[in-house]
Image (spheres, rainbow, N blue to C red):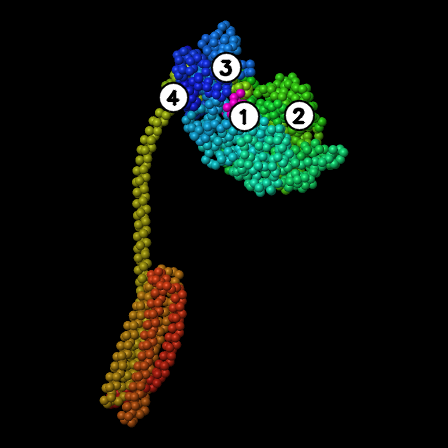
Amino acid sequence: MGSKVLPSLQPIKSLPPDFKVNGNLIHDVMESRGDAKLRSGGLAGSSSPENYYLSEEAQDRAGGVGLFNEDIAYSGKSVLLEDRESIVDEGLESVPLPFQSVSVSSRESRWSDTTPYVSKKKLQSWFQLPNGNWELANIIKTSGTESVISLPDGKVLKVKQDSLVSANPDILDGVDDLMQLSYLNEPSVLYDLQYRYNQNMIYTKAGPVLVAVNPFKKVPLYGNNYIEAYKRKATESPHVYAITDTAIREMIRDEVNQSIIISGESGAGKTETAKIAMQYLAALGGGSGIEYEILKTNPILEAFGNAKTLRNDNSSRFGKLIEIHFSETGKISGANIQTCRFSVSRVVQCNEGERSYHIFYHLCAGAPPSLREKLNLQNAEDYKYLKQSNCYSITGVNDAEEFRIVMEALDIVHISKEDQETVFAMLAAVLWLGNISFTVIDNENHVQAVENEGLLHVAELIGCEVEDLKLTLSTRKMKVGNDNIVQKLTQSQAIDARDALAKSIYSCLFDWLVEQINKSLAVGKRRTGRSISILDIYGFESFNRNSFEQFCINYANERLQQHFNRHLFKLEQEEYIQDGIDWAKVEFEDNQDCLNLFEKTLGLLSLLDEESTFPNGTDLTFANKLKQHLNSKSCFKGERDQAFTVCHYAGEVTYDTTGFLEKNRDLLHLDSIQLLSSCTCHLPQIFASHMLTQSEKPVVGPSHKSGGPDSQKLSVATKFKGQLFQLMQRLESTTPHFIRCIKPNNLQSPETYEQGLVLQQLRCCGVLEVVRISRSGFPTRMSHQKFARRYGFLLDNAASQDPLSVSVSILHQFNILPEMYQVGYTKLFFRTGQIGVLEDTRNRTLHGILRVQSCFRGYQARRSLKKLRGGISTLQSFIRGQKTRKAYAALLQRHRAAIIIQKRIKALLIRNRTGTIRDATIVIQSVIRGWLVRRCSGDIGFLKHGDTKTTGSDEILVKSSFLAELQRRVLKAEAALREKDEENDILNQRIQQYENRWSEYELKMKSMEDVWQKQMRSLQSSLSIAKKSLAIDDSDRNSDASVNNASDERDYSWDAGSNHRRQESNGTRSTSASLSVISRLAEEFEQRSQVFGDDAKFLVEVKSGQAEASLNPDQELRRLKQMFEAWKRDYGARLRETKLIINKLGTEDSALEKMKKKWWGRRNSTRIN
């Protein structure tokens, strides 16, 4: 760019707020940390406060070296993620370079970073000391091709100008993206990383790659506050959270699976970085509870898969790819874990100063007493497998507490307590296997397992017979032709068989645990196909003595580096070249030759498998075969004895082939598998089934040359290669995001920065090449058709033009500088941040259109809603009115019907009741009238035959008064009967009310009412019959009296009349007595009825709560009924006795009555005559 512009100060916004770019301050900090490799305080003018800002000269210098203005990277108009998200609405194609670029001139794009600017204005440069470290030197003077410099320690040297490397201005100290460096060279990158490392800013961006330097201490960069800040885009500082957030947003935006690939050397912090990324995913995609289970898989996998090495206290001895699935709403819905293991030889063999897998030490230190007793556990020092290395603990790690965490995690991933105990039993069995020893039994060095506590405990823990275990460890069954023979093993063979069994049990146990975890994370989880995979794999290793384990680890890292190169170098530049844009190819270190050395025919892996199948193959023969076939390869170098050297991307590594063939072979014989299948414990049976399935898979290639069942087994290297290819195949289908972890020192010490070690890792990672491609590349690209379709509406007349013309017109209209884009054959290529201007304009235009549309649609919706609401109200009123009218008509009809029914029923009841009363009244009247008639006729007959003299008038008066008395009593009885009827009606109504209130007493009260009514009617009928009988008896007595008088009539003496009067008076007295008895019975009946009625009413009121009394209503009712029954029987007996007496008196009165009738008849006849 020709014009000079002020540089933006945005690049250092991620520095601490209290940090100032003061030369003396920087020098003091660096000197206090003992770091003589950083900038000194001898910078020109660095001690003055005015140097915090660029002078005019510095501004000129900054413009000359490619500093950029506010319209490009890291300025106020930089593109945010929200802006980038809107790009994909029309299918924008984006590569994993979502960072701002630097506006550079065409000259700088040719990588002239080392332009001899020193000879013009530059006062400081980098100078490399003989020990390889870089120092910042002040240039005193320059003469020709030589310069005089002064070092921070005060030394003055005269050096060639070519040996100096340009240094960046002070304002770029500690930038958070290496793309902002004006001079991109190794010392500048080293210094920038160290500067940020000393400020506890361990994350730095290198284009699309995040560089993470392991601080070896806790730094305040994590937690909910930071997660929320990166979630809301409140900060743009480099962080694992930022990379993870980008992956989530691109997954939702592009609907493409993402992956976060974490790589680096052993001890660089890959495992911790993976856990931090998972924590952010869980925080953003949590809510269903599955995220907590996913996080809890880390303690389990680390305990069973990690171990302490010489360079790393928590080194991953396996690779894992955690694929986290998301729902359509961006919430975690499930997960799946894929592992990649090469060997578990660490179980049986461990180097000095290292440890086996963590879980063994956790179990020995943290198992509760009940579990220790059940598993016969001892201390770690008591097991031969663990005491080989003389290392039992790690500084700062509490194995007992870690065991508690592992048990809690096993509960969370739904592994039952029974299965957990079985898992711990398998671990204890592996430890006790190492304590099994052998004794020689013959001269041929054949051995037999000693029946010690190790053998007994192993048999008990896996559930097999002791003799079967002894036989399996000391003999081997072989099939020769049709015969089976048993071959005794030598001591070395028996030890190999024992160790193979231990390794197989542990390997299968690890696979089983991963399978159970996957079931727990996937059961019932709905997946949409979108996922984010996090790869945490073992880092590159190079020790003084490297064995088969390092061989496999470094091969996996070569394959991973190829994946890195393919996505960041090869594919990127190939697309530029194919589309015909102006592009200067950036050279990078390609490791394809090293991969070919491992994977091609007659490569390292194939030769290893071939030699492993030969019975007589040894490590020496394998080394000689490698030298024979591979000496011509550029990446291979044969060494003396049994060693060879491979030129890896990270440097040369020399491998010792001792133990290669043994570790590559699967030494587990079929006898051991059969032993596991015969165990009573279910896990060994599962392991045996799994191993039988694996052993049936044939090995393709030269392994078929040797016969026997063992020759058909897959070698460890072949299994590992297959797992690695599956893992890489899954990664190829995702959009990668790379995190490179850097180990600042080998001592695992905080605040220690070794330049040489860091520089080696940066070279291996290709960080400088990535930054160069990112600075000069075009990370955003879009086809002409999509670009025209997405932004064409911003032009006035774009419909009649072709897509290319529309695209060019848009670029010219928005003043996009020519160096900021390239027009290819099929696509437009933009530098980082340039598409943001178009997106901002498009978003503003679309936002205005949407505002207008929303207002108009809102007006239409409100008008339609108002009209619809009015129609609904009218319709509702009609419907409700119709429903109300119908309901009222139905209610009125029901009311009328109810009235008619009530009227008919009441009329029927009244008619029935009236008829009953009328019939009863008629019967009573007929009885009384008959009795009166008969009585009157009896009195007349008696008077007719009586005395015709003065005594006749007296008799008539007596009979008349007697009749009046009888009538009076009859009327009184009728009145009493009516009163009783009324009382009965009242009682019936009350009883009916009580029956409606209390249904449980309905039957009882009805039965009592019926009984009382029957008894009253019986008593009334008895009273009527008694009265009737009395009347008849009176008439009979009158007749008898007449007959007796007639027989003595001829005497006509007063004596006869006197006798008759005496008899009549006797009859009258008997009748009066009978009437008095009947009256007493009637009065007793009335009193008793009143008493029983009142008692029954009182008990009903007590039962219903209307009256209070300290008695049991049910019990008192039963007692009242019993009293009533007793009275009824007594009353009936007395009534019958009264009836008999009345009947007896009636027979005597009948004779008197007859006599009266005769006398009355004779007297009447005499009067007539």
Mark 3 or mark 1: name the one nearer the start of the chain.
3
Can residue 745 be found in the magenta stretch? yes
Residue type highlighted by circle 4: Thr
Considering only vertical position in the picture, is 256 above or below 1115?
A: above
User: Going by the image, does 554 lie left or right of 1130?
Assistant: right
Residue type highlighted by circle 1: Gln
Q: Which residue is mark 4?
A: 841
State whether residue 109 appears in this view: no
Q: Which residue is mark 3?
A: 153
Depth check: give the residue in front, 808 or 107. Answer: 107
Mark 1 vs mark 2: in front: 1
C-alpha span from label 2 to label 4: 67 Å
Q: Which residue is mark 1?
A: 748
Mark 2 vs mark 4: in front: 2
Prevalent SS, magenta region: loop
Q: Which region shows up in magenta?
A: 736-754
- Quadrant that contains the N terminus: top left
**Percent coordinates x, y for residue 489 in the rendering:** 72, 34
* SS type, badge 2: loop
C-alpha span from label 3 to label 2: 48 Å
**Percent coordinates x, y for residue 697 in the rendering:** 64, 31
